[in-house]
Image (cartoon, helix red, strand yellow):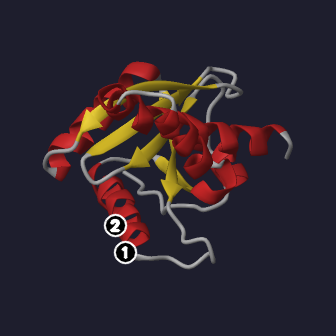
Amino acid sequence: MTHHKPMTDIAELASTLAPGERLMGLDLGSKTIGVALSDLGRTIATPKVIIRRRKFRADAQDLRGLIEEYGVGGLVIGLPLNMDGSEGPSCQSVRQFAANLLAEFDIAIAFWDERLSTVSAERALLEADMTRKRRAEVIDKMAAAIILQGALDRLAHS
């Protein structure tokens, strides 16, 4: 089994995919993981599910199930950089999660700078427009879709 190293370049990630393989976007929160999927043509991101975080192994199994079910060839994981571009503790935990995933199974991973996908602005708009309960249900998978869509848009223009 060849282990991929996490990549930061989305074009590099795309070059590893077979035709018809989808990309999966992940928004890693402390309590949940928002999951989005691309279509087969890798142009549109759709919010899919929210995984309630438990132990890492259980989270990895949930992700593996989705990866197998939907024919996913690569992951795009949102990297929550600070506004000045520096990395805080939340970036370190995202990178560690990716490294742990790569130890469990073989999949290509790229990080996507969340600042490029206006996640925070979208999040603010969503929050303003929903009840607290409804917001908690959709926000993470919407954020995952926004992250993935940003990466897909970059691919389309490269």
Residue at image coords 37%, 75%:
89
The disc at residue 5 is none
- On the picture, is 78 further left or further right than 49? right
Q: Nearer the viewer, residue 114 or 19?
A: 114
From the image, tell me which residue sits under label 2. Answer: 93
The image shows residue 124 at horizontal and vertical percentages of 54, 44
Rendered position, 83 above or below 132:
below
Question: Is residue 85 positioned above or below 41 on the image?
Answer: below
| Residue indicated by mark 1 | 89
Q: Is mark 2 on a helix, strand or loop?
A: helix
**Quadrant position of residue 83:** bottom right
Residue 21 figure quarter: top right
Left or right of residue 38: residue 90: left
Q: Are marks 1 and 2 in contact (CB under 8 Å)?
A: yes
Residue 20 percent coordinates (x, y): 62, 22
- Neighbour tally class for label 1: few under 14, some 14-19, many 20 plus, Cα within 10 Å: few
| Three-letter amino acid code of the residue under disc 2 | Ser
